[in-house]
Image (cartoon, rainbow, N blue to C red):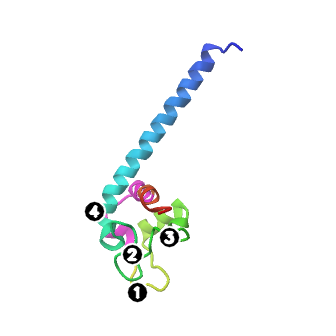
Amino acid sequence: MKHSPLWFAGILVGALASSIAFSAHAESIEEGEKLFNTTCVACHGQNGKGKLPGVPDFTKRDGRLAKTDDVLASHIMNGFKSPGSSMAMPAKGGMSSLNQEQAEAIVNYMRQAFAGN
């Protein structure tokens, strides 16, 4: 079967788009790691297991990371109090300049670092 030059161009464009998306995701994870390590680590710990009573353990299979990305980013942006916890996570983790894209980067990092451990 002979393919036209447009078919090959389509394959090339698709491969390039996949490469760019992978690179953007990798950059997002890297940014999320930096943000997590400067803000979130104080309560959630380097290993994601939580350093304070009532702070969720991100490494539990049925735990906090079982929620959708949108819910997790919303918790980061708006704050959240876990049931039974005596304290709440402040909106934006207490970092007033945090934006939605950065919250999503933190979620990407947490999934890569802690999910399935």
Label 3 CA crowd tier, 10 Å (few <14, some 14–19, many 20+): some
How far apart are the two marked residues, 2 and 4, measured between alpha carbons?
Answer: 15 Å
Amino acid under disc 3: Lys
Span of residues in magenta? 89-107
What percent of the width, then of the height, locates residue 7?
A: 63, 20
How far apart are the two marked residues, 1 and 2, measured between alpha carbons?
Answer: 10 Å
Relative height, residue 33 to residue 66 (above, below): above
Residue at which label 4 appears: 38
Label 4 CA crowd tier, 10 Å (few <14, some 14–19, many 20+): few
Mark 2 or mark 3: whose residue is earlier in sequence: 3
**What secondary structure do most residues of the magenta stretch adopt?**
helix
Residue at which label 1 appears: 86
Quadrant the N terminus occupies: top right
Image quadrant assignment for residue 101: bottom left
Number of numbered markers: 4
Q: Tell me, yes or no, whether the two marked residues, 3 and 1, touch with CB atoms within 8 Å.
A: no
How far apart are the two marked residues, 2 and 3, measured between alpha carbons?
Answer: 19 Å
| Label 2 secondary element | loop
Residue 95 appears in the figure: no
| Label 1 secondary element | loop
Relative height, residue 14 to residue 78 (above, below): above
Amino acid under disc 4: Thr
